[in-house]
């Protein structure tokens, strides 16, 4: 009996891992930053993925409310209209406003991601994107949706996590700025 020998040839289609590694290196660079930068970036990435996922899922749940009603017999639209009345919104316009809010929030979290990438690379411009994205997100919450929505529909968990994101990033920015000033003073 002849034994069949199988020869495995490596092609770029065998595994998605090389593509993922290449994408990671393109976005974050090949050099790993120091420990504190990594911890700050990982914490911010965890918060980023949580909020971005929530807004994307909410957007699609509202967009496909008819499918949900047919498949799961849950009337999402009437739930949203009822909540709009409780919050003092006009139910006729609230659905579109909520849909726009989730879309614009996802975009602001995309800007925050750019800030996290710059943070990972230890570039001070990260503050512009990260804090700018957070400011845009808070503007959406407070001015577009209203203070009552922020007060009643934004959970305490969300408020605490956003405070951690801001505090952690602000502390990192101040430490990075201080270190940059010390390096500039030594060079003179």
Image: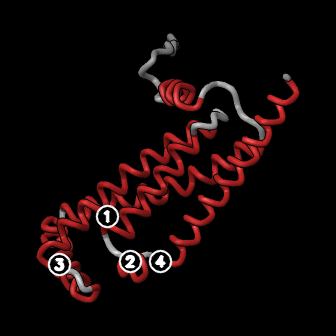
Furthest-bottom residue in this view: 86
Q: Secondary structure at mark 2?
A: helix
Determine whether label 1 and label 3 are within 8 Å by CB.
Answer: no
Determine the CA span between mark 2 and mark 3.
27 Å
Q: Which residue in the protein does label 2 denote?
A: 147
Is tag 3's residue or tag 4's residue first in the polypeptide sequence? Answer: 3
* Residue at image coords 52%, 30%: 27
Furthest-right residue in this view: 186
Is tag 2's residue or tag 3's residue first in the polypeptide sequence? Answer: 3
**Front residue (pair 74, 41):** 41
Determine whether label 2 and label 3 are within 8 Å by CB.
Answer: no
Q: Which residue in the protein does label 1 denote?
A: 58
Residue 82, x across and y down, in percent = 21, 86
Is residue 188 shown to the viewer in this render? Answer: yes
Determine the CA span between mark 1 and mark 4.
15 Å
Determine the CA span between mark 3 and mark 4.
23 Å
Q: Secondary structure at mark 1?
A: helix
Is tag 1's residue or tag 3's residue first in the polypeptide sequence? Answer: 1
Residue 182, x across and y down, in percent = 83, 35
Is tag 2's residue or tag 4's residue first in the polypeptide sequence? Answer: 2
Q: Nearer the viewer, mark 1 or mark 2?
A: 2
Relative to 40, is 86 above or below?
below
Q: Secondary structure at mark 4?
A: loop
Q: Nearer the viewer, mark 2 or mark 4?
A: 2
């Amino acid at each position: 009996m002849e034994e069949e020998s199988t020869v495995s040839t490596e092609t770029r289609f065998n595994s998605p891992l090389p593509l993922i590694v290449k994408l990671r290196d393109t976005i974050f660079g090949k050099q790993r930053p120091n420990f504190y930068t990594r911890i700050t970036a990982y914490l911010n990435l965890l918060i980023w993925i949580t909020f971005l996922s929530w807004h994307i899922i909410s957007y699609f749940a509202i967009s496909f409310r008819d499918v949900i009603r047919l498949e799961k017999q849950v009337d999402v639209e009437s739930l949203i209209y009822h909540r709009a009345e409780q919050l003092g919104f006009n139910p006729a316009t609230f659905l579109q406003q909520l849909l726009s809010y989730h879309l614009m929030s996802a975009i602001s979290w995309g800007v925050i991601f750019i800030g996290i990438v710059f943070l990972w690379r230890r570039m001070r411009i990260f503050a512009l994107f990260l804090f700018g994205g957070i400011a845009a997100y808070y503007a959406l919450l407070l001015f577009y949706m209203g203070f009552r929505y922020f007060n009643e529909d934004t959970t305490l968990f969300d408020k605490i996590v956003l405070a951690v994101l801001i505090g952690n990033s602000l502390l990192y920015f101040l430490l990075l700025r201080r270190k940059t000033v010390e390096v500039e003073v030594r060079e003179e």
